[in-house]
Amino acid sequence: QAIEEGFDIGILPEGQPNPTPELGLQPVYGGAFTLARMSRRPIQMLSLYGLHKMWHPDGSMGCSQRQMKVRVYPQAERMYKDSEEFATTFEAVSGTFGATGRDLPKQELQMWLDGTMWQTELARRASVETTKQNQEDQRQPEDAKIGQMN
């Protein structure tokens, strides 16, 4: 209902604040992507640094710090094509800020936000897959020779 009424909503794609951001993100869930797609609204990405020192999800840790950083990234007109694209972008952008309190280098950050780095990532994945397939194809004749000898 809030979305239908024009309100923005905040979602933690990890499902909760990350208690150990210095170790990397927890699994990123696709709920933010699904809501954005269903509502036909863009995702406004933001990152938090220091929240893990103010609150712990299991309640075992008291507040050791009262300061945190919030980074709101420029609104992109970008609509993510699928949850994997969103999750990978979120991991690169928010994961870096959440762990260090600093953004990626300016050009790399802009490429993630505008989607060009995602295209680079897809090309890299395709290249890795092609290399694996070529290595597998080269092994098959050797395996066949070994099978003929037995």
Image (tube, helix red, strand yellow):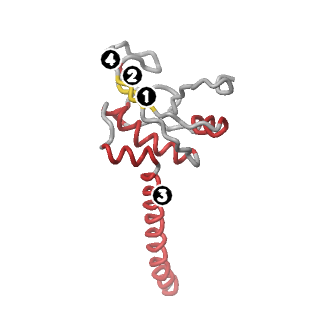
Q: Position of residue 99 (x, y in %)?
A: 34, 33
Residue shown at 66%/35% (left/top)?
Answer: 39
Q: Nearer the viewer, residue 145 or 125?
A: 125
Residue identifier under label 1:
18
The answer to which of 113 and 19 lies nearer the viewer is 113
Q: Earlier in the sequence, mark 1 or mark 4?
A: 1
For marks 2 and 1, give the CA distance.
Answer: 8 Å
The x, y position of residue 7, in whole percent, is 60, 23
**Residue shown at 49% from the left, 40% from the top:** 76
Q: CA distance from mark 1 to mark 4?
A: 16 Å
User: Residue under circle 2?
Assistant: 51
The numbered mark, 3 or 1, whose residue comes first in the sequence reads 1
Earlier-in-chain disc, 4 versus 2: 2
Tag nearer the camera, 2 or 3: 3
- In the rendered structure, which amino acid carries the disc numbered 1? Asn
Mark 4, other Cα within 10 Å: few <14 / some 14–19 / many ≥20: few
**Looking at the rendered structure, which numbered label has been put on residue 67?**
4
